[in-house]
Amino acid sequence: MNVSVFAVVLIGLFAIGAAAVVLLLAVAVAGRIRDKRTPEERRADEYGDMAPGTFKLTPGFGGDVDGGGGSL
């Protein structure tokens, strides 16, 4: 049986990728099951008391804050 090195490497990379996807899905499902918060509680924890219609740009900064300008 004549198997090329390229085929072995390609199959190995596919197997590693498939295992990574399965592992990430398992971690996501386990995290979702362990999180007992309601969707409303999750949103409140993530966005806090931001005004309706605004959005979160980066962690710690809300949209439409200070007219879009920032101060350091």
Image (cartoon, rainbow, N blue to C red):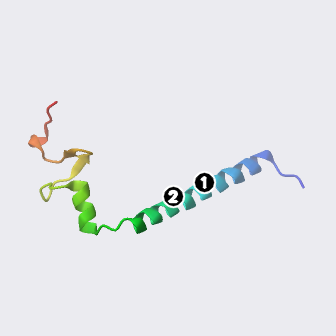
Q: If the image is split into quadrants, where does the C terminus sit?
A: top left
- The answer to which of 43 and 5 lies nearer the viewer is 43
In the rendered structure, the answer to whether residue 57 lies left or right of residue 25 reads left
Disc 1 target residue: 17
- The answer to which of 63 and 1 lies nearer the viewer is 63
Residue type indicated by callout 2: Leu
Identify the secondary structure beneath mark 2: helix
Checking the image for residue 64, the label placed there is none
In the rendered structure, the answer to whether residue 56 lies left or right of residue 53 reads right
Residue at position x 19%, y 55% from top?
48
In the rendered structure, the answer to whether residue 45 lies left or right of residue 27 reads left
Q: Residue furthest right?
A: 1
Q: Residue furthest left?
A: 67
Q: Quadrant of residue 47?
A: bottom left
When the figure is inspected, residue 62 is found, relative to residue 30, above or below; the finding is above
Checking the image for residue 24, the label placed there is 2
Residue at position x 50%, y 62% from top?
25
Residue type indicated by callout 1: Gly
Asked if disc 2 and disc 1 are in contact, CB closer than 8 Å, the reply is no
Q: Quadrant of residue 35?
A: bottom left
Residue 34 image position (x, y, % from top left): 41, 66
Q: Residue furthest top?
A: 72
How many numbered badges does the structure rendering display? 2
- The answer to which of 38 and 2 lies nearer the viewer is 38
**Which of pointers 2 and 1 indicates the residue nearer the eye?**
2
Residue 12 image position (x, y, % from top left): 70, 51
Residue 7 image position (x, y, % from top left): 75, 51
Identify the secondary structure beneath mark 1: helix
Q: If the image is split into quadrants, where does the N terminus sit?
A: bottom right
User: How many other residues sit within 10 Å of disc 2, few (<14), some (14-19) or many (≥20)?
Assistant: few
Residue at position x 60%, y 54% from top?
17
Question: Which one is earlier in the sequence, the residue at label 2 or at label 1?
Answer: 1
